[in-house]
Image (spheres, rainbow, N blue to C red):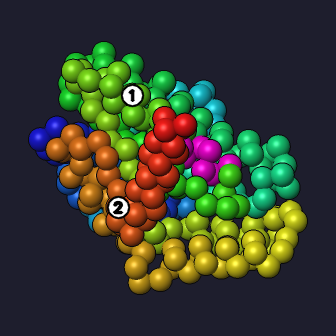
Amino acid sequence: MDTLESKVAVVTGAASGIGLGMARTFGHEGMRVVLSDVSDEGLNKAVADLRSEGIDCIGQLADVRSVEAVEALARAAADSYGQVHVVCNNAGVGVFGRQWELTENDWALAIDVCLWGVINGVRVFVPRMLASGVQCHVVNTASMGGLLSAPFVGPYAAAKHGVVGLSKSLRVELGGTNVGVTLVCPGNVRTNVARAMREQRDSQRRGGGADLDDFLCFLESGLEDESAMDPADVGKLVAQAIKTNQFWLLPNGAPQLPLVEADFEEMRSSSASLVAE
């Protein structure tokens, strides 16, 4: 897709953070943008802010856990702007705690939003894109947490690893078609995840212990310090990846790549030892 000018994008989780960063970049590149979120207040503010910058956009409430809601989102986009060229399956939540202390609802929230939200976006938008015959693109937001695992993030890690796997498969399935795929695995980015972690730690987290408190404080600080990337910069990288049909996109992921490499080295060593035996 050589240009984004006059194209249409749908972005979920667009009221703040990376989603809003993508929507803003798309708008300034001349796209018409459909912002979607579950937060009515946040969505209205985001739409108003972008319109004040001269961006042609609308907002559509949608809970991506529901395929019916995603279908309604697709219809709203088509009714307002016609063919959707780019869909960004970006909505996500953070669920933190010891795996055995989290409830079924805790697990369901992470899996349903972070993984099923992407699945529903693929199921709803890809058939429409293929049928259009024009150049289109799917952007799935995973995380460096989809390539690595840390303690106390079991549900999030499971969901994000799932997004990585399905996106790699989708890339092959759509090879040679008019639909490209980009997998975004951000490292530290300044988003509302830090605020959500504080709220969960203060009022929702089950169990406890200094180790979990220390981990959450460490994660919080990483999302808010100077090394964390601005979501607007992530949006610019995503726009460039769409135009160049780049699959892997790891914004601010370089500091964590040695850990990914260490995982693969451990796998190689383990495999070699099995062969030797």
Asked if one can make out residue 219 in the rendered structure from this viewpoint, the answer is: yes
In the rendered image, the vertical position of residue 127 relative to residue 260, given as above or below = above
From the viewer's perspective, tell me whether residue 221 is left or right of residue 7. Answer: right
Q: Residue furthest top?
A: 131
- The residue identified by callout 2 is 251
From the viewer's perspective, tell me whether residue 68 is left or right of residue 244. Answer: right
Q: What percent of the width, then of the height, locates residue 202?
A: 79, 74
Graded by Cα atoms within 10 Å as few (under 14), some (14 to 19) or many (20 or more), the crowding at tag 1 reads: some
Q: What is the three-letter code of the residue carrying label 1?
A: Leu
Q: Main secondary structure of the magenta part?
A: helix
Instruction: Tell me the element at label 1.
Output: helix
- The residue identified by callout 1 is 170
Q: What percent of the width, then of the height, locates residue 171?
A: 33, 30
Q: Residue furthest left?
A: 2
Q: Between 180 and 173, which is closer to the camera in this rendering?
A: 173
Residue drawn at x 24%, y 21% is 177
Q: Quadrant of the C terminus?
A: top right
In the rendered image, the vertical position of residue 25 relative to residue 198, given as above or below = above
Q: Between 107 and 27, which is closer to the camera in this rendering?
A: 107
Q: Residue furthest bottom?
A: 226
Q: What percent of the width, then of the height, locates residue 24?
A: 33, 59
Residue drawn at x 42%, y 75% is 228
Q: Residue furthest front?
A: 277
Residue drawn at x 75%, y 72% is 212
Q: CA distance from mark 1 to mark 2?
A: 21 Å
Query: Which residue range is magenta in the image?
Result: 155-161
Determine which of the numbered discs, if any, sits on residue 136 in the image. none
Q: What is the three-letter code of the residue carrying label 2?
A: Pro
Task: Tell me the quarter of the picture where residue 188 sits.
Answer: bottom left
